Amino acid sequence: MKTQVAIIGAGPAGLMLGHLLRAEGVDCVVLERHTPDYVLSRIRAGVLEQVAVDLMTRLGLDDRLKAEGLVEEGFNLADGERLIRIDCMGLTGKSVVVYGQTEITKDLMDAAPGRGLEVIYGTEDVALHAVESDAPYVTWRKDGSDHRLDARFIAGCDGFHGPSRKAIPASVAREYERVYPFGWLGILADVPPCNHELIYANHERGFALASMRSHTRSRYYIDVPLTEKLEDWSDDRLWDELAIRLGPDAAANITRGPALEKSIAPLRSYVFEPMRHGSLLLCGDAAHIVPPTGAKGLNLAASDVHYASEALCGHFKRNDSDGVAGYSAKALARVWKSERFSWSLTKLMHRFPEDGPFERAMQVAELDYIANSKAAQTSIAENYVGLPV
Ligand code: RFL
Ligand code: PHB
């Protein structure tokens, strides 16, 4: 088989990039290890910045997003009894949209056949070859036979554990990493949210987040030590803990219900440089991870594929190779700013085991500053709604 761009991974990054390229008449094929049902069963992001919404609009795939997405004009930081509202709309003129990653992925998957976007599911042992040349190729196994796809470029959209990043030699690579000493225990339940806007809470017992997927489906998280076992957290224990950490006002409005999904996700900050090597471009979690505190992961995948599609269309349609050459630097400039915001919000809202009274006093002082400073609130708001692409 032959194509112009071989895309590895059919998560949001791979599917968005595939659609953007097809919309411009660039040939591509997406290779995905899992089945569509498996990809759709992963409960992940919930908050979209304008960059992700704009991308779906540009693709003409925003009907359901517009109809079902919840526009959030602000969010809240809670510290004990205090609730600080960040008025994103008032401070920046912009909002975010609550629309699950599952829904975005479904919209992109459903539209693929009609848009001529070929996605091959169930690809095993995907391997990248000759990425430093102008004729890279990908091999895999499916249904017991070997396959090969020749391309001009490979887009590595295969998440944190995929093979793409590893195809870049260590001699040219640089990794930056911070692993946090806790994970987020999340619960999804078909109950109305306790508040119409998200609440990020820093409580003496730990962090909590009240989020949602719709008016009837809620998503909550608490932070737990990495040693914690999921089976020790019955639904009741988790609802009790959420009620304490989110504070009495939110607790009074929490509706409890059975978990549709419950899982623990580790928290990590990670950046891999460069995001392009030869004919291989990395997009999304394949190149970087943010802790979920700023809701930036999926949105960074969207900004990466925006830059990558511009670069690849420049190459194929205008014979302009500058975009590909500059892709890594352009994408990383935005990645690092989102890394900074996610890290700083994580530090502000979590109790780290190594923290003492001084670190806690710093959190209180910063929250107090935020509560009383329009400049501080504006800075948080413009990062939360997303920096320009
Ligand atoms: P994905 O979604 O991991 O997709 C990668 C795809 O590649 C496939 N793959 C392979 N295919 C072929 N061969 C191989 N060898 C392969 N290895 C892997 C995988 O099966 C998969 O289908 O990466 P992508 O597309 O870069 O998208 C990134 C986002 O998924 C991620 O950043 C977000 O989910 C992060 N995130 C959030 N982001 C936000 O913007 N807002 C949020 O509110 C938000 N909340 C979250 C989050 C992530 C979470 N977890 C569980 C990590 C909340 C949580 C709890
Ligand atoms: C979610 O709804 O899953 C969610 C929302 C905000 C975050 C992280 C996750 O910061």
Image: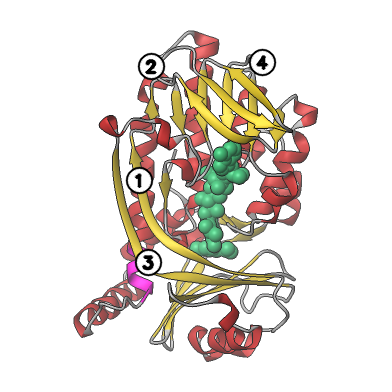
- Residue 250 sits in which quadrant? bottom right
Label 1: few (<14), some (14–19) or many (≥20) C-alpha neighbours in 10 Å: many
**Image spot of residue 138 (x, y percent):** 55, 24
Disc 2 versus disc 4: nearer the observer: 4
Furthest residue toward right: 114
Mark identifier at residue 1: 4
At x 35% / y 41%, what residue is drawn?
Answer: 272
Q: What stretch is highlighted in magenta?
A: 344-350
Judging depth in this view, the residue of 80 and 305 nearest the camera is 305
**Image spot of residue 98 (x, y percent):** 62, 59
The disc, 2 or 3, on the residue closer to the chain's N-terminal end is 2
Q: What element carries label 3?
A: helix
**Image spot of residue 371 (x, y percent):** 36, 75
Query: Is residue 51 visible in the rendered structure shown here?
Result: no
Residue type (three-letter) at the residue carrying disc 3: Thr
Query: Is residue 239 visible in the rendered structure shown here?
Result: yes
Label 4 near label 3: C-beta < 8 Å? no
Judging depth in this view, the residue of 242 and 151 nearest the camera is 151
Q: Is mark 1 on a helix, strand or loop?
A: strand
Residue type (three-letter) at the residue carrying disc 2: Asp
Q: Mark 3 points at which residue?
A: 346
The disc, 4 or 1, on the residue closer to the chain's N-terminal end is 4
